[in-house]
Amino acid sequence: MPHFIIDYSANLEDALDWPAFCDLLRRTAIDTGVFPMAGIRVRALRADHVSIADGDAQHGYIDLSVRLRAGRDLDTRKRATAAIFAAAEEFLKPVMASRSLALSMEMRDIDPELSPKTGSTRDHLKG
């Protein structure tokens, strides 16, 4: 794993290409060399009901949460966080230039003793 969960305000639904954004994060995660490709999962979840800052309905947000199995040292996690955040920020520059948008990210470890996993993704990867 990691799981990349993009939580975003509904007023951004048509402001960007969500499949492209998800794929950018997936490719960037692979390029860091920190995460196994077969474990990467990226998803975007729209929040239909939000209230931001002064309540102006034009304000938007994107919060990227990265959950990963414990075991990577802090420097490795910091390097991966910086690369992923920079890619997201670059992708979102045009949107941020034209509207109110807050971007945030958090990477956190999951305790492997409390998070059982199973799956067959690796069995079905091409090449």
Image: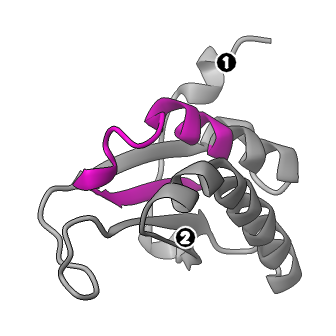
Answer with mark 1 or mark 2, whichever residue precedes in sequence: 2
Which residue appears at 42% of the width and 68% of the height?
100
Q: Are marks 1 and 2 in contact (CB under 8 Å)?
A: no
Which residue appears at 40% of the width and 43% of the height?
15
Which residue appears at 77% of the width and 74% of the height?
77
Q: Is residue 16 magenta?
A: yes
Q: Which amino acid type corresponds to the residue marked 1 in the rendered image?
A: Leu
Q: Is residue 7 left or right of residue 101?
A: left
Residue at which label 2 appears: 112
Place of residue 86 in the rendered image (x, y in percent of width and height, measured from the top left): 75, 62
For label 1, the crowd category at 10 Å Cα-Cα, with few meaning under 14, some 14 to 19 and many 20 or more, is: few
State whether residue 1 appears in this view: no
What numbered label is drawn on residue 107? none
Q: Which quadrant holds residue 127?
A: top right
| Residue placed most toward the observer, 94 or 48 | 94
Q: Is residue 91 left or right of residue 8?
A: right
Q: Which quadrant holds residue 7?
A: bottom left
Q: In the displayed orientation, state which residue is furthest to the front.
A: 98
Q: Which amino acid type corresponds to the residue marked 2 in the rendered image?
A: Pro
Element type at mark 2: helix
Residue at which label 1 appears: 125
| Residue placed most toward the observer, 48 or 28 | 48
Q: Is residue 80 above or below residue 107?
A: above
Boundaries of the magenta span: 1-25
Q: Of tags 1 and 2, which is closer to the observer? A: 1
Place of residue 66 in the rendered image (x, y in percent of width and height, measured from the top left): 55, 65
Q: In the displayed orientation, state which residue is furthest to the top.
A: 126
